[in-house]
Image (cartoon, rainbow, N blue to C red):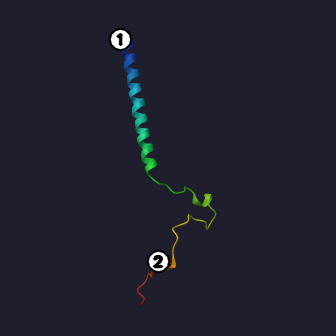
Amino acid sequence: METVITLLAAALLIALGTRLIHRLNAQHDARIAAHHFDDPYPSLSRPPGHSHPGPPERIADRRPAGTWP
């Protein structure tokens, strides 16, 4: 009888540990999915000089950077 109780307790602890690890992995995956990561190796995935297109810039939106009159 003691052996059966010991085996049931061990099985219960294994099940609880498995459930805990599963929940922690799901939480970690959710945190990773919330972040936006750029290309890991942009030089390998795009040829040189071909970066991500930015927002279109109009000439009228440009402002001088210095204080020249």
Sooner in the amino-acid sequence: mark 2 or mark 1: 1
Quarter-of-image position of residue 5: top left
Horizontal arrangement in the rendering, residue 59 relative to residue 14 (left or right): right
**Residue under pointer 1:** 2
Q: Which class describes the residues within 10 Å of circle 2: few (<14), some (14-19), or many (20+)?
A: few
Quarter-of-image position of residue 46: bottom right
Quarter-of-image position of residue 66: bottom left
Point out the frontmost of discs 2 and 1.
Answer: 2
**Residue under pointer 2:** 61
CA–CA distance in space, label 2 to label 1:
81 Å
Image mark count: 2
Reply above or below: 35 against 22.
Answer: below
Which residue is painted at 60% across and 61% down in the image?
Answer: 43
Q: Residue furthest bottom?
A: 69
Q: Amino acid at mark 1?
A: Glu
Q: Amino acid at mark 2?
A: Asp
Which residue is painted at 40% across and 17% down in the image?
Answer: 7
Horizontal arrangement in the rendering, residue 46 relative to residue 31 (left or right): right
Q: SS for tag 1? A: helix
- Quadrant of the snapshot with the C terminus: bottom left
Q: Residue furthest right?
A: 47
Reply above or below: 23 against 68.
Answer: above
Q: Which class describes the residues within 10 Å of circle 1: few (<14), some (14-19), or many (20+)?
A: few
Reply above or below: 52 against 13.
Answer: below
Which residue is painted at 40% across and 36% down in the image?
Answer: 23
Q: SS for tag 2? A: helix
Q: Position of residue 50 (x, y in %)?
A: 61, 66
Which residue is painted at 38% across and 17% down in the image?
Answer: 8
Q: Position of residue 60 (x, y in %)?
A: 48, 79
Reply above or below: 54 against 65.
Answer: above
